[in-house]
């Protein structure tokens, strides 16, 4: 008998066909299924960092043995329930790192050089009537602070060096395998930075860590980029700072209450917004899909999980 999988996110066709061939798959992309008989027999779920596996979900899956995450974020998985029930969890370690780091730089360039505004200006015929009325900001030769020095933070820092930037960072602890300066205080990091990039994981320890004081410490020519988790930033304080020009702009791929983004944020011209898709490339999707497939195969074959999270 095939193991029963509840799949909560789409996968590329190549991976989907192989999973369909090996398992009984219940695909539920729009809402969590209400069929209790189906839920009682689920052995594993395929989820992502945004959906996760909260307690309300886990309580409806009494025979769940394994969670595989299509991505690297697991802060939305209820850890206490997972530990109590001995449910195994695996992630796609390091797969989206390069693409997420690229998106951080893309958001920075877009908002600082006003690329989207300039594109709209040209398309709407503004150039024929005169020059674009605003000046952008250079991203070269700047002081950049990074919150989070995991694989993604390190990849971002390496890319920033190509712009001849001075990079500093803050994290839960100092990393002795990097040459960039460690600054323990997030507010102090923001004060010395022209650009602050959030590459930290979510969860209770980082919730609203980027508060009003941190945001305003960036100053009127400062930019804030977030490709980490939306919960890390006090979104109300950020909107107020953008509206009153206390900072120059922001590039955001993640938000507090996804997929809902406040109209007051959407309406601002000094922000660039993308729908939690920093790792959304063909290459990363396929590689991550293979991680999901292999994790399912290894788990149900009784083999070691290469990307298991140990709680």
Image (spheres, rainbow, N blue to C red):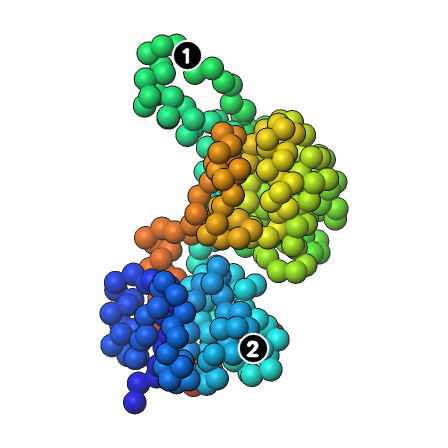
- Residue 82 is marked as 2
Compared with residue 279, is residue 115 higher up or lower down, i.e. above or below?
Answer: above
- Asked whether residue 196 appears in the rendered view, the answer is no
Residue 185 left/right relative to 42: right
Sequence-wise, which precedes: disc 2 or disc 1?
2
| Residue found at x 59% / y 53% | 231
Residue 219 in the figure: left or right of residue 289: right
Instruction: Please state which of residues 225 and 212 is positioned toward the viewer in this rendering.
Output: 212
The residue drawn where x is 55% and y is 45% is: 226
Which residue occupies the foreground of this view, 8 or 15? 8
Q: What is the crowding at mark 2: few (fewer than 14 residues within 10 Å), some, or many (at least 20)?
A: many
Q: Are marks 2 and 1 in contact (CB under 8 Å)?
A: no
Judge whether residue 95 can be spotted in this image. Answer: yes
Estimate the x, y position of residue 250 in percent, counting from the top left: 55, 36
Q: Name the residue under label 1.
A: 131
- SS type, badge 1: loop
């Amino acid at each position: 008998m095939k193991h029963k999988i509840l799949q909560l996110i789409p996968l590329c066709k190549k991976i989907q066909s192989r999973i369909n061939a090996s398992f009984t798959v219940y695909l539920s992309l729009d809402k969590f299924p209400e069929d209790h008989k189906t839920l009682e027999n689920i052995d594993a779920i395929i989820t992502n960092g945004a959906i996760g596996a909260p307690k309300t979900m886990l309580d409806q899956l009494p025979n769940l043995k394994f969670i595989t995450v299509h991505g690297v974020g697991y802060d939305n998985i209820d850890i206490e329930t997972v530990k109590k029930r001995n449910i195994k969890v695996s992630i796609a370690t390091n797969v989206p790192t390069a693409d997420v780091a690229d998106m951080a730089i893309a958001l920075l360039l877009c908002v600082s050089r006003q690329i989207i505004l300039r594109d709209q200006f040209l398309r709407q015929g503004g150039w024929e009537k005169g020059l674009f009325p605003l000046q952008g900001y250079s991203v070269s030769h700047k002081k950049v602070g990074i919150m989070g020095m995991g694989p993604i933070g390190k990849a971002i820092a390496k890319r920033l060096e190509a712009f001849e930037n001075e990079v500093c960072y803050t994290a839960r602890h100092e990393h002795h395998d990097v040459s960039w300066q460690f600054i323990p205080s997030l507010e102090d990091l923001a004060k010395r930075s022209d650009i602050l990039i959030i590459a930290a994981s979510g969860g209770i320890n980082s919730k609203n860590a980027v508060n009003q004081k941190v945001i305003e410490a960036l100053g009127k020519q400062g930019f804030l980029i977030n490709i980490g988790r939306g919960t890390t930033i006090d979104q109300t304080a950020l909107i107020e700072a953008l509206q009153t020009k206390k900072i120059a702009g922001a590039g955001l791929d993640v938000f507090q209450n996804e997929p809902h983004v406040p109209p007051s944020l959407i309406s601002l011209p000094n922000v660039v917004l993308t729908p939690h898709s920093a790792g959304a490339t063909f290459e990363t999707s396929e590689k991550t899909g293979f991680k999901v497939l292999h994790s399912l195969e290894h788990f149900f074959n009784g083999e070691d999980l290469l990307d298991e999270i140990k709680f």
